Amino acid sequence: MQSLSACIFDLDGVIVDTAKYHFLAWKRLASEWGFDFTLEQNEQLKGVSRMRSLEILLSIGGITLDEDSKQKAAARKNEWYVEYISNMDESELLPGAKSLLIEVKEQGLMTALGSASKNATLILDRTHITKYFDAIVDGIKASKAKPDPEVFLRCASELHVPPQECIVFEDAKAGIEAAIQAGMRSIGVGSPEILGIANRVVSSLAEVKVQDLLTL
């Protein structure tokens, strides 16, 4: 049985759900341009970069912009998103997130956040859980998107633990693939149909106990 030294957590969809705030910001932009943007259409934007999301939104609205206008629109959308998440609090933590972080620390394991979000530190501060992380690797520190393993390997490096002694918690297939490429074990948070390549799949962190991780 492999030893376990650290738990690495993705942020969005695992610890918090900020997808609704991305949607509200894109919807606000669409309203400015005179059309409605629906939740169904928003599905096309999941897991997609900001600029690619903007291209999809423009396509839905039948709008053409020059490059400078696109950059300004994307920046405005991000300002609104940051405005929304600045009002987050601990009540927006997903089920089991805080209790698992506490249990992991009590068991003497290291913790890291491995997220592509450039607003990760703000979200952790607003939800009052920054203190539970020994390392934070976000979209500012890591430049390569998952499934590239860069973000998780940087977490292991900052924690000074071997990758094979880490377990990653992820809600996206690309994140699980990144964990596998990093040589780490993984727990998928979400649908078994999508995350079946993980070592284990749960519907939320509320289903996870540290004792179970030690035997994974």
Image (cartoon, rainbow, N blue to C red):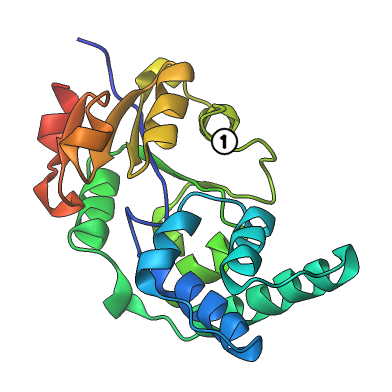
**Quick one: 79 or 49, which is closer to the camera?**
49
Q: Residue at x 26, y 12 (%)?
A: 2
Q: Which residue is mark 1?
A: 151
Image spot of residue 213 (x, y percent): 18, 30
- The image quadrant of residue 17 is bottom left
Q: Residue at x 15, y 48 (%)?
A: 203
Image spot of residue 169 (x, y percent): 32, 40
The quadrant in which the N terminus is found is: top left
Image spot of residue 123 (x, y percent): 49, 69
Q: Residue at x 31, y 75 (%)?
A: 92
Vertical arrangement, residue 146 with respect to residue 20, above or below = above
**Quick one: 41 or 11, which is closer to the camera?**
41
Q: Residue at x 43, y 65 (%)?
A: 42
Left or right: where does residue 28 sit relative to residue 193?
A: right
Q: Secondary structure at mark 1?
A: helix
Image spot of residue 211 (x, y percent): 11, 33
Badge count: 1
The quadrant in which the C terminus is found is: top left
**Quick one: 29 or 63, which is closer to the camera?**
63
Given the image, on which type of amino acid does mark 1 rest?
Val
Q: Residues within 10 Å of mark 1 (few under 14, many from 20)?
A: many
Determine if residue 18 is in view: no
